[in-house]
C-alpha cells in the first residue's frame, strides 16, 4: 500500500513530523515501511506557462518557436520540438536556471539560430512515471487543465511536494489497505485526532427513488452477504480533477476518466472496491448475484474472453454476466463515451471465492487483493455514498433517492473482555487502567468497565484481525512502545542444546568422507517413475510414493533409491569434462506397501557413493590409474572402521538388480552376539546396460541404509598407550576351494585365536594349475601381542596351531608347502 502524506494530512495533522520520522514511528509500531519516496525528483524553477503563439522554426521543419507567458516580467521565446504543442495550451515551463532530474540544467540557448529562453517539459523530463499518466498525456509535452493558474510552481500543481510511504503489510492488517485505515493507525501512533469526510452530509439526493429504476437480487448468499447500489443519471464523462489524478498516481494507479477515477479513489480511501455499470446496458436495470454456470463465458474489460467455472461468483443482469464479482467488470456493461446513467455497486464478497477465481483466471487487481483479505463490512454503504457524492460534484451526476440493497445485515459488534492483570503479566508491564483506556481511545476502540480490573472492548469492523484478548494485548504493546517494555530474566528450567544421535552420526559421516577427498552432492527427492525401480535392493517389494500435484512427469514420485540421481549428477559432470568423480550424498528415500496411501509412507536415511575415472591424475613419473571395485570397498571399510563396526560388517558377493553380475556385493551388519546379519546396503560396478544407457565410463556405486549405523555405531575415540611389549608375527598360506571367501576365514581366525590376536590380513591370493582344479592359495599375516607381558614362542605356536586346525576343520584347508 502506497500512502501519500499529502493525502493523509487531509485526515490528520502531520505538523512537526517529517516523512522519515513518521516512517520510523510506524515501523516501530509494527507496520514496516519499506521506502519513503520523494515525488519531487529534483525539479526547481519550473512553472505553469501559457502558449500565446506557435510558429514554425524558419530553419527546421520539426521545431516550433513558441511565445510563452510564464508569469515573468516578459514573455519567453522557447523553441520546442514536441508534436502536440499548440497555442492556447497551459504547459510546464522550465525557466533559465532551472534544474531537472538527471542533472539537467536549463540555460539560454540558440537552436538553429533562434534564441530559446527555457524548455517546455514532458512528464518524463519531470521525473514522473509516464506510464501512470492518462493515455493522451503519455506522448509529447505535458498539457495542463485550462483552469491552471499561470506562474504557479509546477511542484504545487502536480503534487510533487509530496512523499509516499510504502507499507509492507502482513496479511492480517488489511485495514491499512486504505487511507482511512492508515489515518487511524497514524492517529493512534501520534495520539492525534482523526477527521474523516462525511459523504452523507455532502450528498444531495434528487429525483425519484432509485428503486424505481434498478433492482438487486442475491442468489449466492454465502459468497455475497451484502450488495448495495445507487442510481445516478445525467453524468458527463471527462477528466477527473488534477488533484485527484495526482493522488491516484502517487498511489500507483493510472487515471482514466472521472467515473473510473472516482471509484478507484474511493477504493483507496475506504478500502472498499466499487464498480460502475452503464445502467442502460443492464436488462431492466436488474442486478442478480449468482454462481457461474458450467461452460459460461464473459468478455472482461481487457477484451479477453474468460471461461467460467461453477465456483466463480458472477454479477449478472438476469440474462447475461456483466462482471466477475470482485475481480473485473464485463465489456458489455462498461462505462463509455455514450454513458449517461450509472448503477454504482458496493458489496461484500467472500474473500476465499474471489481469491480462487482471481488466481485461476490470472487476474489480480487492487480490488481483488482487498476482497481476498476481507473488506470492512461497515464501509459498504459509506464508500457508496462517498463515490456518489464525488460523481455528483465532478461528473454532474444526479443521485436518485435511496439505496437499493440485498442481504443487508448489520455487522455484529465484537466485544472482547480484557483482564488488566493478565495483560500486565503477558507484557511484563505495570500499566494502569487509565493508561490502557487511553491507548484504546487513540485506537478508536470503545471500552467500558465490566468488573474490577476487567475491560469490555468493542472492536470496530475495520479491524477484522482482532478476535481474542491476546490481540488486544498486542495492540497495547505496540502503541505503548516495545522499547518501553522492561526486560526480564528468562525463568524456568533450561536444557542445553545438543545434536541427536542421528544428527551427530550424519555429521561424522559427512566430515569423514569430505576429509577423505569425497565431494558432497544434494539432489531432488522427486524422480521419474521409471527411475524409482532401478535399484530396489533396500526397498524390495515396496512401491514408490506418487505426488498428488507433481511439477512435471520427471518429478512425479518420491525416490526409492538415491543412486539414479547420483548417476544424473555424474552425466552432468562428464558432459562438462569432469571425468574423475568421487561424490557422496546423505539423504532420505521413501516407499510404501500401499497402492493408495492411507498412512504415512516409510522414510529412511541412506548414504550413496559414486566413484568413476582415475584414482590419481597422470604425473611425469606415475601413470593414471583407473579406480576399481576395491577403491569403493576400501572407502566403505574405512567408514565402518571409523564408526567402530568393522568387525560386524560382512560382504557377500551377489548380483543385486542394477549392478554388474560378478562385480558387486551386498553389505550385512551382524548382531552383537554374532547372530544372523541384516542387509544394510549394496555396492559394486554399475550394470553394463545401465552404463550404456547413461553413456558413462566404468562407474562404481554403493548405497547404505544408515538407520542401523546410527543406532549401532560406536564413534567415540578411545586412546591407549603405546605397547611396551613386542609383537610376534606368523604367516600362514592355505589352499582352499575357490568358493571359500577370505572374509569367512578371517572371521574364523579371529574367533579361534582369542584376545592375543592383534591383527590379521590377507597379503596374497594365488591360483594356478599346480594347486589343483578349482583351488586357490590364500596367504595371511597374523600379529600376536600381549599388552601385559612378552609372549613366548611356545604360547604363540599353541595359538597358531588352533588357528590352523580351525581352518582345516571348517574350510578343508591344507597348509601350502
Image: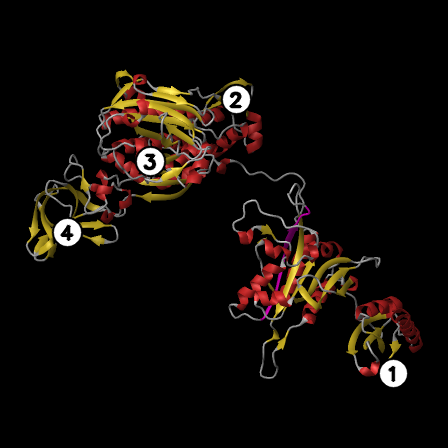
Span of residues in magenta: 580-593
Where residue 203 sits: x, y (%)?
28, 21
| Foreground disc of the pair 4, 2 | 4
How far separated are the C-alphas under marks 4 and 1? 111 Å
The residue that mark 1 highlights is 817
The residue that mark 2 highlights is 455
Kindly state the secondary structure of the residue where label 1 is placed.
loop
How far separated are the C-alphas under marks 2 and 1? 102 Å
Where residue 314 sits: x, y (%)?
40, 30
The residue that mark 4 highlights is 81
171 part of magenta stretch:
no
How far separated are the C-alphas under marks 1 and 3? 107 Å
Badge 4 local density, few (<14 within 10 Å), some, or many (20+)? Answer: some
Q: Residue at x 66, y 72 (%)?
A: 628
| Foreground disc of the pair 4, 1 | 1
Tell me which label, 4 or 2, sits earlier in the chain.
Answer: 4
| Foreground disc of the pair 2, 1 | 1
- Do the numbered discs 4 and 2 sit on residues whose CB atoms are within 8 Å? no
Amino acid at each position: 500500500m502506497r500512502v501519500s502524506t499529502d493525502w493523509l494530512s487531509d485526515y490528520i495533522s502531520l505538523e512537526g513530523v517529517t516523512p522519515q520520522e513518521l516512517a520510523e514511528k510506524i515501523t516501530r509500531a509494527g507496520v514496516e515501511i519499506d521506502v519513503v519516496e520523494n515525488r519531487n525528483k529534483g525539479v526547481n524553477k519550473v512553472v505553469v506557462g501559457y502558449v500565446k503563439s506557435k510558429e514554425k522554426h524558419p530553419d527546421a521543419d520539426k521545431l516550433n518557436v513558441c511565445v510563452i507567458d510564464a508569469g515573468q516580467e516578459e514573455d519567453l521565446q522557447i523553441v520546442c520540438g514536441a508534436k502536440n504543442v499548440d497555442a492556447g495550451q497551459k504547459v510546464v515551463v522550465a525557466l533559465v536556471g532551472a534544474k531537472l532530474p538527471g542533472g539537467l540544467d536549463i540555460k539560454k540557448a540558440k537552436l538553429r539560430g533562434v534564441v530559446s529562453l527555457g524548455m517546455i517539459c514532458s512528464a518524463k523530463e519531470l521525473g514522473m512515471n509516464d506510464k501512470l499518466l492518462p493515455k493522451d498525456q503519455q506522448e509529447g509535452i505535458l498539457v495542463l487543465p485550462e483552469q491552471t493558474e499561470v506562474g504557479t510552481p509546477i511542484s504545487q500543481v502536480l503534487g510533487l511536494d509530496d512523499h509516499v510511504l510504502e507499507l509492507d503489510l502482513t496479511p492480517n492488517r488489511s485495514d491499512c489497505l486504505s487511507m482511512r485505515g492508515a489515518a487511524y493507525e497514524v492517529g493512534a501512533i501520534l495520539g492525534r485526532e482523526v477527521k474523516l469526510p462525511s459523504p452523507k452530509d455532502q450528498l444531495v439526493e434528487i429525483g425519484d427513488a432509485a428503486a424505481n429504476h434498478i433492482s438487486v437480487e442475491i442468489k449466492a448468499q454465502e459468497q455475497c452477504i451484502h450488495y448495495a447500489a445507487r442510481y445516478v443519471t445525467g453524468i458527463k464523462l471527462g477528466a477527473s480533477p488534477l488533484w485527484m489524478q495526482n493522488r491516484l498516481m502517487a498511489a500507483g494507479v493510472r487515471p482514466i476518466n472521472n467515473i473510473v477515477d472516482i471509484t478507484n479513489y474511493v477504493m483507496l480511501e475506504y478500502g472498499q472496491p466499487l464498480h460502475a455499470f452503464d445502467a442502460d446496458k443492464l436488462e431492466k436495470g436488474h442486478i442478480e448475484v449468482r454462481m457461474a454456470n458450467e461452460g459460461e463465458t464473459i468478455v472482461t474489460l481487457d477484451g479477453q474472453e474468460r471461461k467460467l467455472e461453477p465456483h466463480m461468483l458472477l454479477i449478472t443482469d438476469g440474462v447475461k454476466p456483466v462482471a466477475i464479482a470482485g475481480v473485473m467488470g464485463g465489456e458489455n456493461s462498461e462505462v463509455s463515451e455514450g454513458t449517461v446513467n450509472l448503477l454504482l455497486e458496493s458489496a461484500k464478497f467472500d474473500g476465499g471465492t474471489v481469491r480462487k477465481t482471481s488466481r485461476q483466471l490470472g487476474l489480480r487487481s487492487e480490488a481483488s487483493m482487498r476482497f481476498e483479505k476481507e473488506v470492512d463490512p461497515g464501509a459498504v454503504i459509506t464508500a457508496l455514498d462517498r463515490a456518489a457524492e464525488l460523481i455528483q460534484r465532478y461528473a454532474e451526476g444526479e443521485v436518485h433517492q435511496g439505496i437499493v440493497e440485498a442481504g443487508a445485515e448489520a455487522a455484529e459488534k465484537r466485544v472482547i473482555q480484557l483482564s488488566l492483570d493478565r495483560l500486565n503479566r503477558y507484557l511484563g508491564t505495570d500499566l494502569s487502567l487509565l493508561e490502557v483506556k487511553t491507548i484504546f481511545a487513540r485506537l478508536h476502540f470503545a471500552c467500558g468497565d465490566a468488573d474490577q480490573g476487567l475491560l469490555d472492548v468493542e472492536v470496530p469492523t475495520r479491524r477484522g484481525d482482532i478476535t481474542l484478548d491476546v490481540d488486544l494485548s498486542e495492540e497495547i504493546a505496540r502503541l505503548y512502545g516495545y522499547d518501553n517494555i522492561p526486560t526480564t530474566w528468562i525463568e524456568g528450567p533450561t536444557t542445553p542444546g545438543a545434536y541427536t544421535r542421528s544428527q551427530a552420526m550424519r555429521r561424522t559421516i559427512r566430515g569423514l568422507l569430505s576429509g577423505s577427498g569425497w565431494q558432497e552432492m544434494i539432489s531432488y527427492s522427486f524422480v521419474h517413475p521409471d527411475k524409482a525401480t532401478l535399484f530396489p535392493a533396500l526397498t524390495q517389494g515396496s512401491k514408490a510414493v506418487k505426488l498428488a500435484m507433481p511439477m512435471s512427469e520427471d518429478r512425479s514420485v518420491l525416490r526409492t533409491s538415491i543412486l539414479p540421481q547420483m548417476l544424473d549428477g555424474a552425466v552432468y559432470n562428464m558432459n562438462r569434462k569432469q571425468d574423475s568423480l568421487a561424490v557422496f550424498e546423505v539423504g532420505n528415500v521413501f516407499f510404501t506397501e500401499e497402492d493408495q496411501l492411507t498412512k504415512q509412507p516409510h522414510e529412511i536415511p541412506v548414504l550413496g557413493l559414486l566413484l568413476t575415472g582415475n584414482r590419481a591424475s597422470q604425473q611425469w613419473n606415475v601413470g593414471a590409474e583407473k579406480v576399481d571395485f576395491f577403491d569403493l570397498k576400501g572407502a566403505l571399510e574405512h567408514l565402518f572402521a571409523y564408526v567402530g563396526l568393522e568387525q560386524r560388517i560382512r560382504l557377500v558377493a551377489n548380483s543385486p538388480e542394477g549392478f554388474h553380475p560378478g562385480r558387486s556385493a551386498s553389505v550385512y551388519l551382524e548382531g552383537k552376539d554374532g547372530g544372523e546379519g541384516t542387509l544394510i546396503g549394496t555396492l559394486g560396478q554399475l550394470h553394463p546396460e545401465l552404463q550404456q544407457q547413461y553413456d558413462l565410463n566404468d562407474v562404481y556405486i554403493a548405497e547404505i541404509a544408515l538407520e542401523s549405523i546410527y543406532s549401532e555405531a560406536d564413534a567415540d575415540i578411545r586412546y591407549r598407550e603405546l605397547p611396551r611389549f613386542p609383537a610376534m608375527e606368523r604367516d600362514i598360506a592355505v589352499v582352499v576351494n575357490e568358493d571359500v571367501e577370505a572374509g569367512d576365514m578371517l572371521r574364523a581366525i579371529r574367533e579361534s585365536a582369542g584376545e592375543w590376536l592383534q591383527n590379521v590380513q590377507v597379503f596374497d591370493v594365488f591360483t594356478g594349475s599346480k594347486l589343483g582344479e578349482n583351488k586357490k592359495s590364500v596367504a595371511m599375516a597374523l600379529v600376536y601381542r600381549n599388552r601385559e607381558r612378552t609372549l613366548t614362542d611356545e604360547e604363540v605356536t599353541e595359538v597358531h596351531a588352533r588357528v590352523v586346525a580351525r581352518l582345516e576343520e571348517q574350510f578343508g584347508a591344507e597348509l601350502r608347502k
